[in-house]
Amino acid sequence: MTPRSWKLVSFFCLSVLPASLVGPARCLAAEPELPNPFFAFDNGLRGIADPPALLKELGYDGMGASGLNVGGLLKQYQDAGLKMYSTYVGCNFSETPPYDPQFAKTVEILEGTGVILWLTVRGGKYGQDDERAVAVIREIADLAAARGVQVALYPHTGFYVATTADALRLAKQANRPNLGVSINLCHELMTDQGTTLDATIREAAPHLMMVSINGADAKQPGFGWDRLIQPLGRGDYDVAGFLRKLREAGYEGPIGLQCYAVPGDAADNLRESINAWKKYQAQLVEK
């Protein structure tokens, strides 16, 4: 529900229904929400007997997969009334072939589903091989475009596309309408981009297709993934403030929960994170 529709529901409850029926219990179903779908990465679902059932019970909108063999998983989530938002795939422009030939079959399966190819890019010498990287990115984007599939560059620490700034630079050079970028909070923090995130969000907004978040501590020297990827709601980094800036920039696309190597019970972590997400909604949505 958008902020505008929430206001309309509130107005309806207050001005149309009889006073005897207007009360907290009558309008609880119309809780305010951010416009962004919220999904969990598959790395947070390991060890759970029935991930779709748990995600639906907790209130997640779906999941983000990994790899190219996603046909069965896609149907499983569709049957559960949930959505697969993305699948995490990669290319390496220093290898031959630079990407798995199965890409062609996968985009056929993804046609019409809205699933985004979340693409990592490796190879070459960092920052010095844009031409080679762009050639492969264009090829994958064109392959996907033939089936109406979108591609979002996934910034990953240590890869050729390591930051959102890298993704933007290459996406602009590739110049494909179905190609966009993403902001991965933990990787921006790990690559010391935290202090420039305001500008990053503004610059990325016209090209932004995906975002990932998690609880984190503000980056300090020596911090590892254990400090930069935590259940949502933990850590001292202002995730609510990050979401506010995304909202101010007009981003209404999917937001994924990064769960890589988070210790503890997976179901408990998912429950803790969705509760934090709901608190952020309450803080950020205009009443």
Image (cartoon, rainbow, N blue to C red):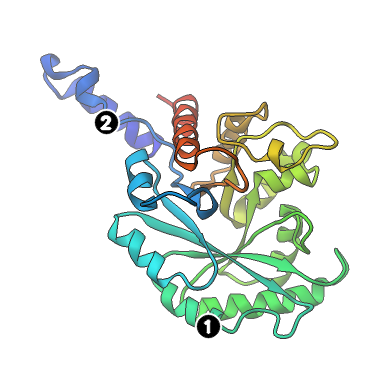
Q: Earlier in the sequence, mark 1 or mark 2?
A: 2
Numbered tag placed on residue 9 in the rendering: 2
Position above or below: 155 against 190: below
Foreground of the two, 262 or 65? 262
Q: Quadrant of residue 264?
A: top right
Foreground of the two, 53 or 150? 53
Name which residue type carries label 2: Val
Disc 1: CA contacts within 10 A as few (<14), some (14-19) or many (>=20): some
Nearer the viewer's eye, disc 1 or disc 2? Answer: 1
Name which residue type carries label 1: Ala
**Quarter of the figure that contains the C terminus:** top left
> Is residue 253 in view from this perspective?
no
**Quarter of the figure that contains the N terminus:** top left
Disc 2: CA contacts within 10 A as few (<14), some (14-19) or many (>=20): some
Label 1 element class: helix
Numbered tag placed on residue 104 in the rendering: 1
Position above or below: 99 against 75: below
Spatial CA distance of label 1 from label 2 is 45 Å
The answer to whether residue 107 is left or right of residue 199 is left
Q: Quadrant of residue 174?
A: bottom right
